[in-house]
Amino acid sequence: MYLPALLLFAVFIFYPLIQGVKISFTNWDGYSQHYVWVGLEKYKLMFSDKKIVQTIQNTFIYGLGSTIFQNLLGLAYALFLDQKIRGKGLVRTVVYLPVIISPLIMGYISYFFFQYDGGALNDAMMLFGKETVDWLSNGPRAVWIITFVNTYQYMGIAMIIFLAGLQSISKEYYEAASIDGAGWWFRFKSITLPLLMPAITINVVLNVIGGLKLFDVIVAMTNGGPGYASQSLSTMMYNLYFARQDAGYAAALGNLMFAIICVISITALVLLRRKEVKM
């Protein structure tokens, strides 16, 4: 019964991975039938390219920044919705709604919000007599705006996972702690967080992987600009392959991104799993 799944994995995952490693040692342009073996030349170029250093920094901001914000906001919403309040179904729907939107469409919607001419944010500032700002013209600011947009879109997934984790915690623990005089913060620190670690583990790993390979929102909002200031490893690979026709360099960059995602996600998984406790 495992054979169909293994076959699909071999054809669509393992074989392309091996081909990507092979291509990274060549000067293939992505189209020609002929290419030359160049060894480690593309990797040497990659580690000496200042643009790649900036791109890696941006990728870490997208990945780690989105992970931190998505988990904090997702947990906050989950704690709020775990209370006995009216309209929690509506709140849950509104928070989760951006998840079902295509990331590319979300990027374009956000661009129309932050764009300089006719952007909703600048129109609101003009209404109050403030000067308009070209929000996406500054590289570091554009990176954090994209991180915010990615956080806003996917914090609903973190909220749902946290909410499921909270609802699986027995109320008896809280009742016993309340009888002993424990306050809200002590109950949260000593009961909620330890028993919520499986949900935290899932969210952190999913968010890290999604953030480190962020592509669609960047293309829609800045296309990696100004210059290369907001590029991620995914968008840089796209530009190298299609714009510069350097498939070998793009493959080397893809292998680097694969290694970064594996190291960070596996490390996070191992460390967080050690903190999980049994109910």
Image (tube, rainbow, N blue to C red):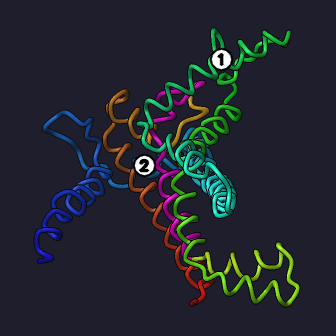
Dot 1 corresponds to which residue? Answer: 120
Q: Nearer the viewer, residue 211 or 55?
A: 211
Residue occupying image coordinates x 40% and y 40%? 237
Q: Is residue 277 above or below residue 39?
A: below
Residue occupying image coordinates x 23% and y 55%? 16
Q: Is residue 203 magenta?
A: yes
Callout 1 secondary element? helix
Dot 2 corresponds to which residue? Answer: 253
Residue 67 locus on image (x, y percent): 60, 56
Q: Nearer the viewer, residue 153 or 79?
A: 79
Q: Quadrant of residue 14?
A: bottom left
Is residue 76 visible in the rendered image? The answer is yes
Residue 127 locus on image (x, y percent): 79, 10
Q: Quadrant of residue 267?
A: bottom right
Quarter of the image with the N terminus is bottom left
Q: Nearer the viewer, residue 276 or 63?
A: 276
Is residue 49 visible in the rendered image? The answer is no
Q: Amino acid at mark 2?
A: Leu
Q: Which residues are magenta?
A: 198-226
Callout 2 secondary element? helix
Q: Is residue 61 magenta?
A: no
Number of the front mark, 2 or 1 = 1
